[in-house]
Image: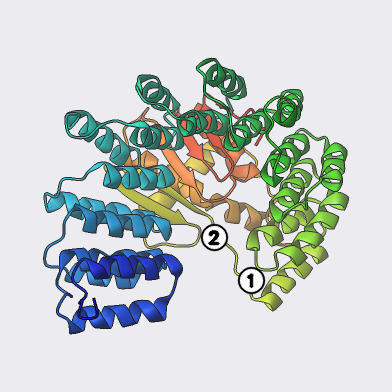
Amino acid sequence: MNDAKPNKFTYPTLLKACGDGGIVAEGKQVHCHVVKLGFAGDGHVKNAMVSGLARRGKIEDARNLFDEMPDRDEISWSVVIDGYIKSGFYKEALEVFNTMQSERIRPGKFVLTSVLAACAHLGALDHGRWVHAYVRRKKKSIVMDAVLGTALLDMYAKCGRLDMAWEVFESMKEKEVFSWNAMIKGLAMHGRADDAVELFFEMQRRKFRPNGITFIGVLNACAHSGAVEQALKLFDSMENVYNIEPEVEHYGCLVDCLGRSGRLEEAEELVNSMPIEPNPAVYGSLLGACRIHGNAELGERIGRLLLELEPNNSGRYALLSNIYAKAERWDDVAEVRKLMKERGVKTNPGSSMIELGGCVHEFKMGEGCHPKMKEIYSTLKVMIERLEMEGYVPNTSQVLFNIEEEEKETALQYHSEKLAIAFGFISTKPGETIRVVKNLRVCDDCHSAIKLISRVYGREIVLRDRVRYHHFRDGTCSCKDFW
């Protein structure tokens, strides 16, 4: 076998191994051999650089190589779309998918599953609906199995259409434990704790055994609705009934549930008595509860600990600053901001996205690059004036600067979710539902303002923030001001 030579089937396996193992130098050496032996133009080989580069997060290099390919099959498109998604470039993933459609490449199940994940993240309901309709049209060639069905229901749940998520779930002929978990998680996001718990028991009646992920979903549902006693019972049953040892994520859910409900002492006791080392997420849940309930003493203690555990996490600084600002401890706010600057920590800017006509529009406070920005600002000004006539008073307690009250109100006025809603107003017909996705937790002021907007303008507004879903209708929110 000494005279055996590598062929075009040899290199894809080698390149995949290099990508999986993260051995870049070796991957480059293999690529040199590919070029040297004349296999660089082979489709299988190119699909394997593209895949390897994408896996290592080198998405620009992967895209450049993809663009150079003369013949691109479904696998090629799937690889680059999946690469964008894994790297967090969801809008770009949808753009590639749109290009794929324009080149009349028929997407298969794996591409569609990836596209649905991008739609779920962006709240791109129109794109998700298109995928659903496509699957229905191609039902002879695309089987709605548990994986595709779960991706579809997850997309609908994360795009605010819990009714459609349930419809897909009910129609699925094949379900796995992860399908039940996705539906429970969807109900949790929308604050439907009772339904999530009922589904938890229903899956067992159907002979599906809950796992650790199931309990994370159902405990989160309890946390978002204040069902503390139910959460405690479920947590106790993990080991006693289901023989599942609680992991740090489960403790985090219970701390979150206790904290949100104002039972801060019990939450702290639970953290201190955990049989495993609490991670920053657990402490973060407790810090968030301190912000909600204005406990500056405990918040300061936990916040300072988190700044040492996660010195580069901007969210921790922002949360501690919020607690200080709420207590009007402006010197402490300034100290936290100074510490951020010294450590070179950059804040994660708030951004909100809204999909209209199949196009995802993104807004950030202070950015004026949208072509309709002038009209958006004008519309927002009129909206705020109308709200003030109805009794709206900006809640400036969370503005992190010791500035004049008027300046604080101006800062609040241009939060990204308000900009997205104003754009929704000028781009849709009266009475149409407006759907917005935000990357951070919605602030108290925006929450109050959107409730009033929904009543004054007779609009249903569905907002997904980092924590959960908010359905604003007739002046109220589905979260019942508990988020």
**Quarter of the image where one finds residue 373:** bottom left
Q: Residue at x 65, y 55 (%)?
A: 408
Structural crowding at the residue carrying mark 1, measured as other residues with C-alpha within 10 Å and reported as few (<14), some (14–19) or many (≥20)? some
* Quadrant of the drawing holding the N terminus: bottom left
Is residue 400 visible from the viewing direction of this image?
no
> Residue reaching furthest top?
205
* Secondary structure at numbered mark 1: loop
Circles 2 and 1, Cβ within 8 Å, touching? The answer is no
The amino acid beneath tag 1 is Val
Q: Residue at x 22, y 78 (%)?
A: 34
The amino acid beneath tag 2 is Pro
**Quarter of the image where one finds residue 452:** top right
Q: Which residue is mark 1?
A: 345
Per the rendering, the mark at residue 399 is none
Q: Position of residue 428 (x, y in %)?
A: 32, 37
Per the rendering, the mark at residue 349 is 2
Q: Viewed as shown, does residue 473 lie left or right of 277?
A: left
Q: Position of residue 42 (x, y in %)?
A: 15, 69
Image position of 114 with respect to 321: above or below: above
Image position of 77 with respect to 200: above or below: below
Q: Nearer the viewer, residue 41 or 257?
A: 41
Q: Residue at x 71, y 43 (%)?
A: 252
